[in-house]
Image (spheres, rainbow, N blue to C red):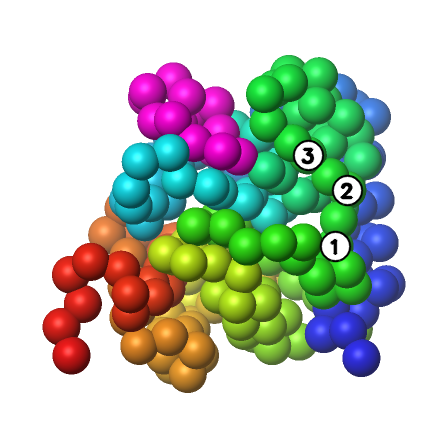
Amino acid sequence: MQTLDPYDASQVVLRYQKRIAEHGATFASLCSGSAEKQAIRHSVHASALRGINPSILGVGCGLGDFYKYLTDHGVDCSYSGYDIVPEYVEECRRAFTQATFHVRNIFADGIDGDYDSIVMSQVLNNRYQKSQNVEVMRQALEIAFRHTHVSVSVDMLSSYVEFQNPEVFYYSPEEIFRAAKAIAQRVVIRHDYRGFEFCVQLFHESVDGYLK
C-alpha cells in the first residue's frame, strides 16, 4: 500500500496547476517564499554534496532551481529531476537540456537507479487529508537513502513556529531526527538557517569523515 494516498498526490498536483494557470510555470507558482530564501535552502542542500561531479536526483524538482543554483556556482554535476506536476517537468526539459527530467511519484513508482545524493526541497509540506505526513516523510527518507551512495537532504517546515497555516504541515525536528536515525547512523539537523524551517541530512557511513 502506498504511504502517500493517490488522492493526496492528485490534490498536490491540482494545487500547483491552479497556481500555474494564474502565474504560468514560474517561480511565483511554487509559492516558496523569496528567491533569497530559496538560495539559502539551496546552499544548505549543497553542503551535503561530496566529491567531483556528483550524481544528483532532485525529487519534487519544481523548475530545476537547485540545478541552476549549482551551475551558477560552478558545481559540475550530473542532475536528474522528478516531479509529479507535468507542467514543471516540461518547463525543466525546455530550460535545462543537459539534465534529465521525468514525471514520477517515488511512492508509486520508486526511484530508477542510484545517485550520489538525493535532494528534496519544499516537497512534502502540504498537509495531507488521507495520509500521515510524518509517515510519508519517513518513507521518503527511507526510499531516498536506499538509492544513494553519499547523502539525502530534505528541508521542511518546523513545529517551532508562532503561527500555523492549516494547509501545510509542521514537522517536529526531534521526531524527524528519531526517524532519520532509524535509517542512517550519520544524521545532521540544520535548524540554523531559518527560524521556522529546518533540514535533515542523512549520510552513508562510507563517506569520508565517519569515525566508528
Mark 2: which amino acid? Val
State the separation of the CA atoms marked 2 and 3.
7 Å
Mark 1 crowd level (few <14, some 14–19, many ≥20, 10 Å Cα): some
- Quadrant location, the N terminus: bottom right
Q: Is residue 112 above or below residue 179?
A: above
Mark 3: which amino acid? Phe
Instruction: Identify residue for label 2.
Output: 103
Please report the residue visible at 29 percent of the width from the left and 45 percent of the height from the top: 50
State the separation of the CA atoms marked 1 and 3.
12 Å
Span of residues in magenta: 66-79
Q: At numbered mark 1, what does the secondary structure look like: helix, strand or loop? A: loop
Locate residue 39, reporting x and y percent.
38, 30
Please report the residue visible at 67 percent of the width from the left and 54 percent of the height from the top: 112
Q: Quadrant of residue 5?
A: bottom right
Specify whether residue 78 is painted magenta. Answer: yes
Mark 1: which amino acid? Asn
- Quadrant location, the C terminus: bottom left
Instruction: Identify residue for label 3.
Output: 101
Locate residue 31, reporting x and y percent.
60, 36
Please report the residue visible at 66 percent of the width from the left and 62 percent of the height from the top: 127
Q: Are marks 2 and 1 in contact (CB under 8 Å)?
A: no
Q: Nearer the viewer, residue 198 or 162?
A: 198
Residue 199 bears which disc, if any? Answer: none
State the separation of the CA atoms marked 2 and 1.
7 Å
Locate residue 122, reporting x and y percent.
54, 47
Mark 3 crowd level (few <14, some 14–19, many ≥20, 10 Å Cα): many
